[in-house]
Image (cartoon, rainbow, N blue to C red):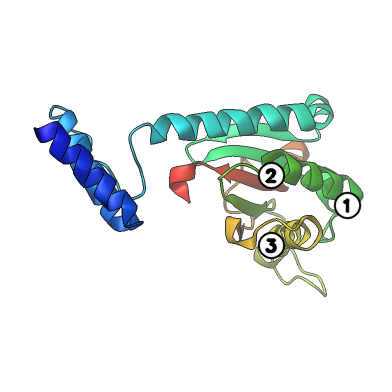
Amino acid sequence: MTLLFALFTTMYAMSRVDDGKYLRVAAGLHEALNPKDTVPLKAGVLPGGQALMVQDQNNARAMIERDMAEELRSGRMELLEDARGLVLSIPEASAFPPGSADLSDVAKSAVTRLAASIRSSSSGLLIEGHTDDVPMHSARFASNWELSTARAIAVVQWLVEHEQFPPSRLSAAGYGEYRPRVPNDTAQSRARNRRVDIVIQNVQKR
């Protein structure tokens, strides 16, 4: 009887097309059928959501590795993974002239292919600009903060204006020299720190 009541209640909620009510009923149904399950359902997340998230990330990784194979193999780009999701790291040498926020042709091509690779994904993109610790003073940029932020924004603008990527899935941040990947103690290390990271965020991080 309990199962029949839960079934008819669920069907009624769905017929009303009320997302909030549906999630509340789904949570109650999940609790009734899984009394020993101590993990609560969150708003907008139904059982199996974690598996779907992992599958989404795995699909994104596979497509990026396929479409960016040449750049990844040559070291012109690097694909990493951390708690936030996948990170496609593009060194300054592959993305911008020194001290500039103008995207190179190589970077435009890479960002275009990245957009095609993950367009069907549900993940958001966080574009991060990073510099080394050498002070920046130019007519256009007064600090590394401004340069790193301008570079992140340049990638966002390209995605929106040229790839029609949904702006709601994009965000930009500039960190200057304050989130180095390695210590700024050699020319090679500084070159690694001058980069733009495109973070393909885990679904639950959006």
Residue 61 percent location from the top left of the image: 64, 30
User: Which picture quadrant has residue 184?
Assistant: top right
Q: Is residue 25 left or right of residue 198?
A: left
Q: Quadrant of the N terminus?
A: top left
In this rendering, which labeled residue sits more in front, label 3 or label 1? 1
Which of the pair 87/159 is nearer the observer? 159
User: If you read the primary sequence from the N terminus, does the residue marked by circle 2 or circle 1 appear first?
Assistant: 1
User: If you read the primary sequence from the N terminus, does the residue marked by circle 2 or circle 3 appear first?
Assistant: 3
Residue 93 percent location from the top left of the image: 84, 44
User: Which picture quadrant has residue 67?
Assistant: top right
Q: Which residue is mark 3?
A: 144
| Secondary structure under the numbered disc 3 in the rendered image | helix
Estimate the spatial distance between the alpha carbons at disc 2 and disc 1, rounded to whole Å: 18 Å
Q: Which residue is mark 1?
A: 104
In this rendering, which labeled residue sits more in front, label 2 or label 1? 1
> Which residue is at a point 57% across and 28% down the rendered structure image?
58
Q: Amino acid at mark 2?
A: Asn
